[in-house]
Amino acid sequence: MTTASTAQLATRVADAAQRFLGTLDLEQREVAAFPFTSEDERTRFFYTPTDHGGLSFTAMTAQQHSAALALLAATVSPGWFSTAATVMGLENVLAGLEGFVDFPHDADEIRTRDPNRYQVSVFGTPGEEPWGWRFGGHHVSVSMLVADGEVRLLPTFLGANPASYHGVGANFIRPLAAEEDLGRELVHLLNEEQLATAVLSPIAPPDMVTTNRSRLDGAIRTKATPWLIWRRTRDDFTDSAVEAVAANLGKLGEDHLSALEYTDAPKGIRASALDGGQRLALTALLRQYVARMPDELAESEWARIEAIEDGALSFAWAGGLERGEGHYYRIQGPGLLVEYDNTQNDANHIHTVWRDPERDFGRDLLAEHYAQSH
């Protein structure tokens, strides 16, 4: 049901998208704007430093760059925007840690670690529903769809590499600290019997199990296929990139792979098996992900989560329980999937995503829209 606040959000974002498109010349529009019928492109998302589709900051003027950021700020919560801005700035930190050496599979004129390598794609005409837009780059991705006055903002992805690092003196910077600490707080509250149910594997997967698949259908296993999360082909990869994931995957036996497999049926410990303090810890963790949404959506999203029966909501963990050990968690229930992993770069490289298999990319809204239109 359309609410006044949702309608205000849709109008605010459409206005910001129109302002952004209005700054572009014809050539730039051809790169940034897609027909709404571009379904395959609209339902893609990446979280690697690859071509995310659309117009890059590197191809924008200062005015256009500001308009693109204003569009992002109009779409997400203030906290999500500031975190995303921090993550984008991490590209220079990561470049320094890697010695400012670009990967050989990139063109000479493109920096691999570049805070300007983020892209904007608009699908359809803002304000003429249905329409949508996407923002994506290394460790930042969000997709929005508007149809019949309703808004979907799924999936949303945030990552950080490094996940924690020193600033000047005693300053310590951790963009996704709560996502890590609240998850570990919950698992530390579990007793031995509960841990036996919650911990799927003593070894964490090398990445999110569902990676960047557009659809979450059926059973999904973690695989040594990193090129699937890049727009480039496997032949364009350095051997070290493939070998690193393969080496991590090689630590997982068949029993681990089977236990970690994503299925429609949630795995791990059910919320109904948690005591009061443990349930509060799970609530705090879930609220951290809901906080990605703007106020106009956050209340309804939280109401959806609260409506999930405790017997249908689960929390699962894999890997070590202590800081510095590779680890992973998953929260799953009807219309809800949260995945988090921190295994790469000596457990200092976080990936997080919030998804809904039915509502990702506004599939539910579009199905209803087309059913009413025909």
Image: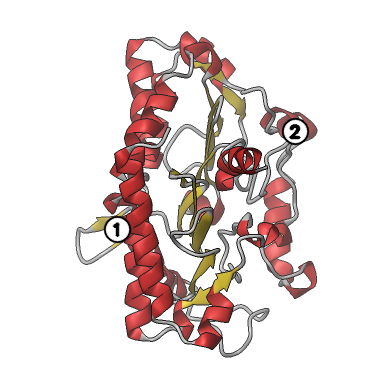
Seen at 40% across and 40% down, the residue is: 180
Choose between 342 and 337: the one closer to the eye: 337
* Number of numbered tags placed on the structure image: 2
Seen at 68% across and 55% down, the residue is: 245
Viewport quadrant of the N terminus:
top left
- Residue 165 appears anywhere in the view: no
Q: Is residue 278 left or right of residue 326?
A: left
- Residue 45 appears anywhere in the view: yes
Counting from the top left corner in percent of width and height, residue 26 is at 52, 86
Seen at 50% across and 73% down, the residue is: 98
Choose between 21 and 70: the one closer to the eye: 21
Q: Amino acid at mark 1?
A: Ser
Viewport quadrant of the C terminus:
top right
Q: Quadrant of residue 109?
A: bottom right
Q: Secondary structure at mark 2?
A: loop
Instruction: Judge whether 43 appears above or below 230 on screen.
Output: above
Instruction: Judge whether 143 appears above or below 136 on screen.
Output: above
Q: Spatial distance from mark 2 to mark 1, Cα to Cα?
A: 35 Å
Counting from the top left corner in percent of width and height, residue 152 is at 48, 45
Residue corresponding to mark 2:
218
Q: Residue lying furthest bottom in this view?
A: 109
Instruction: Characterize the local packing of mark 2: few (<14), some (14-19) or many (20 or more) Cα atoms within 10 angstroms.
Output: few
Counting from the top left corner in percent of width and height, residue 318 is at 57, 32
Choose between 38 and 223: the one closer to the eye: 38
Give the colour scheme of this rendering.
secondary structure
Q: Amino acid at mark 2?
A: Gly
Instruction: Characterize the local packing of mark 1: few (<14), some (14-19) or many (20 or more) Cα atoms within 10 angstroms.
Output: some
Q: Secondary structure at mark 1?
A: helix
Residue corresponding to mark 1:
82
Q: Is residue 107 left or right of residue 142?
A: right
Q: Residue lying furthest front in this view?
A: 374
